[in-house]
Structure formats: structure tokens, C-alpha cells
């Protein structure tokens, strides 16, 4: 890994990690709470798809409220907060400087939690906006933009104060997303919430924003993590630094245009949709370069996947990034979009990106970072195994089931001879599989939360060796002393 971080002395790394400890752990701990809460909402929404009478007497828990509440808690609660925690740690490590504005970033985490809580309650009580990915009411959504700007300024200050040396590719992605997303979020909030904004303008703005939440916010954090942790764990530099820069700049140029492919067939000028299709197909360039870079870096080191929790989660996420990106580009082709649009296929695609890619990378990042912050190792290899296999098998079942259901559903809806009710009945078995998959995923989340709980209390393993999949099979290895893990 060609970065000045590798030349940092252990004492320097320890000092940097200690400067991050309280702030990053608050972001991480908060994100795990929202992960559990969002998982509960997801299970309720999933069951309602095949058993609509479930909790039907509670207006707070109707599908039209539970589903957007789940989406927003997972995006702004779990994904954003875990991503920011990893981002701050990576900035400090790669810039070889202590975390700046620690008090401000700590208060920002508390402020962020309050806004997500208020926004979620507003959705559940019927005050959501019904604008997908922006369901928080304006009086809850607007202030979140302020938090983004605080994080951007802190990132800029660490970058300006970094030790002399080149910028490793992870910093390119991280600093890029701290510039892009505040503009995206604030701009979309103003344009969509403005009374003068028309329906068509809102529609175009909505999908410009929603598509870029993944592409210009979560994806840069995820790829920055992959570019850091794969070389770090296996102990070799990234395959091609030139490829990594090509991937960064083509992502920055093309992804911003791709959102309108979600509006194929809608009442928009043909050129607007065509630009979105072209942008989507051009995404083959950054995706191919990133996939080659990650794969060639791993060549000769795949055996490490048997032992390293961090690497197994990270590689699963990196492979999912390639899959979801290729799927998204193909989905923009008009003939294929006519089949998949308005079907469960789109839901499977969204989960492949936000969950199979970003969330799995976030898990892997936290498995690496937290022991260095709390100075003890993870308490149980078995809990990590339950976490990985529950989420990996559950997500695979989820994606395969809904993808198949979506294709079958789309082909049937394009056949005027098939009654709509018959199409709905055909999808019910797949919706049951969705609930089973969601249950497996939630079991994995609970296992992860238990491990995080012990780590936050600094009750991890006493060993100075990392907790690997091959570690002793005892359920817990509690810490009994203040020994410092290396």
C-alpha cells in the first residue's frame, strides 16, 4: 500500500487513534442503534407485503409509513453515520494528523441523531414528504445539511494540515464526497421543497438526488474503505494507482448524470432521459477499472479470506459493487427497463448497492477500526461468523428472490392478457422468501450489535492477536486487564 500511513510509527498511530476514539465510537455506536431499529422496521414492512393484515390496526405502522421510515433510518442513520465514523478515522490516519474539531464533531453526532429521530417520528406520524429518499419533512431535513458542512470543514482542515506527501486514492474519494453531498442534499431540499417547483421538475430533481446518494456519497466512502483496507490487511500496494485515479475521475464525471434513467417512459424531454442512459453506460469505465484494481491486488492472497473478518466483508462488498454497477448500467437500456421498471427487480437492485456493497464494506471497516480505538479485540469469533453468514446468505437470498420475481412480474405486466391480481399472487412466494432473508439478515445484525456492545464497554478479548475466523471456538473471550492490543 503506497501511502505515508505505512511509515507512521506505532506510537504515532496510537496517538492518532486515541484522538479519534470518542468521536468515532459515538458515530459507530449510534449507527448500530439505527441499524437495529431500521431492521425492525424492514421486517414489519416485509411481512406486510404478503400478510397485509399484520399490525393493520396501528396507523403508525402502515406500509406507507414503515417503509420510508426504514429507508431513511438506514440511509441517514446507519449508512451515513457508520460511513462518517470510518471517514473521520481514515482522514486522520492518512493525513497523519490528530482528529480536529473533536468537540464539534462529537456534538454534530448528537445533533445528527436527534434529527434522524425527529425525522423518523415525523414519517411514522404521517408528516413525511412522499419524495423517495427525502421523506423527512423540510424542517427536519434542512438542518442535516449543516452537519454535512461541519464534516466537510473538518475534512478540509485535516487535509490542509496533513504531513507532507502525496494524496492516497482513498483521500480523493473521501474529500470528493464531502464536497459533493452537501451541495446535492441542500440543493435537492431547496428545489423540491420550494412551492414554485412543478411536479416534473421535482421528479427530475428527486432522482438526480436519490441516485447520487449512493453514487456520490456512499460509493466514495465505500470505495475509499476498500482501497485502504484490502492493501492494509494483505500487506501489498494497490495494483495500479493510475487505474484508481481513472476510476475516481470517471465516477465524478459520469455518475452525476445517470439518475434520469429511473424516469424512462416518464413525461420528460427525450434528451434528458437519454443523457441519463449515456451516463449510466459510461459507468462501465470506472466500474471496470475498480474491479480490475481490486481483483489484481487480491491475486495470490485469497487465502486470507479464510481467516480475516475485515477482508471477507470488504471483498464481499467490493464484488457486490461490480455486480450492482453492471446491473444498473444494463437496467438503463430502454428495452430492459420496460421489463424491470415498477417491479421487485428495482428493490433487489437498490439493496445490492446499499446493503451488499456499502453495508458489508462498513461492517468490514468497523471490524478493523474498533479494536484500535478501544484497545482490545473482538470478544467472539463465533458471533462474527453468525454475522457474516447471516448477512451474506440473507442478502443473496433477498437479491436472487426479488430479482427473479421482478423479471417474472415485469414480463407478466407487459402481457395485457394476464390479470393484474394474478400477477400479484405469483409474487407472494417470493415475498415470503424476502421475509425469511430479512430474518437471517437481522440475526446477523443482532450478533454484530452484541459484539459492538462489548467493544464499546472495552470488554473484548484479552489476546493481543486479532480475533479471526480461526480463533478459539469459545463463545466469548472477555478482557480482564488493560493490555494494549497491537
Image (tube, helix red, strand yellow):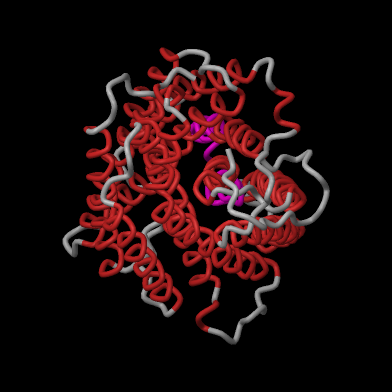
Name the magenta segment's main secondary structure: helix
Q: What span is colored magenta in the figure?
A: 325-349
- Is 112 in front, or is 345? 112
The residue positioned 42% from the left and 72% from the top of the image is 123
Q: Is residue 334 magenta?
A: yes
In the rendered image, the residue lying farthest to the bottom is: 57
Q: Residue 95, position in %: x, y? A: 33, 31
The residue positioned 67% from the left and 58% from the top of the image is 480
Q: Residue 379, position in %: x, y? A: 69, 53
Relative to 83, 152 lies left or right: left
Can residue 339 be seen from the camera position used here?
Answer: no
The residue positioned 61% from the left and 51% from the top of the image is 344
- Is 105 in front, or is 326? 105
The quarter of the picture where residue 280 lies is top left
In the rendered image, the residue lying farthest to the left is: 196
Relative to 331, 140 lies left or right: left
Q: Residue 462, position in %: x, y? A: 68, 50
Q: Residue 45, position in %: x, y? A: 60, 67
Amino acid at each position: 500500500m503506497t501511502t505515508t500511513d505505512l511509515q507512521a510509527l506505532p506510537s504515532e498511530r496510537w496517538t492518532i487513534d486515541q484522538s479519534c476514539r470518542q468521536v468515532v465510537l459515538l458515530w459507530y455506536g449510534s449507527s448500530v442503534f439505527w441499524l437495529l431499529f431500521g431492521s425492525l422496521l424492514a421486517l414489519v414492512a416485509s411481512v406486510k407485503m404478503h400478510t397485509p393484515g399484520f399490525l393493520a390496526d396501528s396507523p403508525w405502522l402502515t406500509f406507507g409509513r414503515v417503509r420510508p421510515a426504514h429507508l431513511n433510518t438506514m440511509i441517514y442513520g446507519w449508512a451515513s453515520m457508520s460511513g462518517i465514523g470510518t471517514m473521520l478515522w481514515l482522514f486522520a490516519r492518512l493525513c497523519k494528523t490528530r482528529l480536529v474539531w473533536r468537540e464539534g464533531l462529537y456534538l454534530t453526532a448528537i445533533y445528527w441523531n436527534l434529527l434522524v429521530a425527529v425525522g423518523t417520528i415525523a414519517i411514522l406520524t404521517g408528516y413525511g414528504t412522499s419524495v423517495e429518499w427525502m421523506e423527512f419533512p423540510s424542517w427536519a431535513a434542512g438542518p442535516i445539511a449543516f452537519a454535512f458542512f461541519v464534516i466537510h470543514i473538518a475534512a478540509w482542515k485535516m487535509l490542509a494540515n496533513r504531513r507532507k506527501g502525496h494524496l492516497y486514492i482513498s483521500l480523493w474519494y473521501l474529500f470528493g464526497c464531502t464536497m459533493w453531498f452537501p451541495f446535492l442534499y441542500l440543493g435537492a431540499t431547496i428545489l423540491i421543497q420550494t412551492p414554485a417547483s412543478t411536479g416534473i421538475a421535482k421528479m427530475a430533481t428527486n432522482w438526480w438526488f436519490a441516485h447520487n446518494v449512493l453514487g456520490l456519497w456512499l460509493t466514495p466512502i465505500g470505495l475509499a474503505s476498500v482501497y485502504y483496507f484490502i492493501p492494509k490487511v494483505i500487506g501489498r500496494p494497490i495494483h495500479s494507482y493510475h487505474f484508481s485515479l481513472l476510476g475516481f475521475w470517471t465516477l465524478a464525471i459520469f455518475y452525476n448524470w445517470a439518475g434520469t434513467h429511473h424516469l424512462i417512459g416518464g413525461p420528460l424531454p427525450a434528451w434528458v432521459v437519454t443523457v441519463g442512459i449515456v451516463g449510466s453506460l459510461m459507468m462501465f469505465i470506472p466500474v471496470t477499472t475498480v474491479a480490475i484494481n481490486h481483483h489484481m491486488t487480491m491475486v495470490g492472497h485469497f487465502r486470507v479470506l479464510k481467516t480475516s473478518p475485515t477482508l471477507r466483508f470488504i471483498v464481499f462488498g467490493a464484488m457486490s459493487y461490480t455486480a450492482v454497477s453492471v446491473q444498473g448500467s444494463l437496467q438503463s437500456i430502454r428495452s430492459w427497463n420496460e421489463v424491470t421498471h415498477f417491479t421487485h427487480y428495482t428493490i433487489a437492485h437498490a439493496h445490492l448497492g446499499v446493503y451488499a456493497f456499502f453495508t458489508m464494506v462498513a461492517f468490514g471497516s468497523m471490524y478493523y477500526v474498533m479494536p484500535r480505538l478501544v484497545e482490545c479485540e473482538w470478544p467472539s469469533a463465533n458471533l462474527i461468523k453468525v454475522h457474516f453468514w447471516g448477512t451474506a446468505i440473507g442478502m443473496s437470498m433477498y437479491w436472487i428472490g426479488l430479482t427473479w420475481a421482478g423479471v417474472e412480474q415485469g414480463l407478466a405486466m407487459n402481457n395485457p392478457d394476464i390479470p393484474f391480481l394474478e400477477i400479484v399472487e405469483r409474487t407472494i412466494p417470493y415475498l415470503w422468501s424476502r421475509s425469511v432473508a430479512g430474518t437471517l439478515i437481522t440475526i446477523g445484525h443482532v450478533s454484530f450489535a452484541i459484539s459492538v456492545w462489548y467493544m464499546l464497554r472495552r470488554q473484548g478479548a484479552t489476546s493481543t492477536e486479532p480475533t479471526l475466523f480461526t480463533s478459539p471456538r469459545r463463545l466469548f473471550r472477555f478482557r480482564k486487564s488493560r493490555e494494549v492490543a497491537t
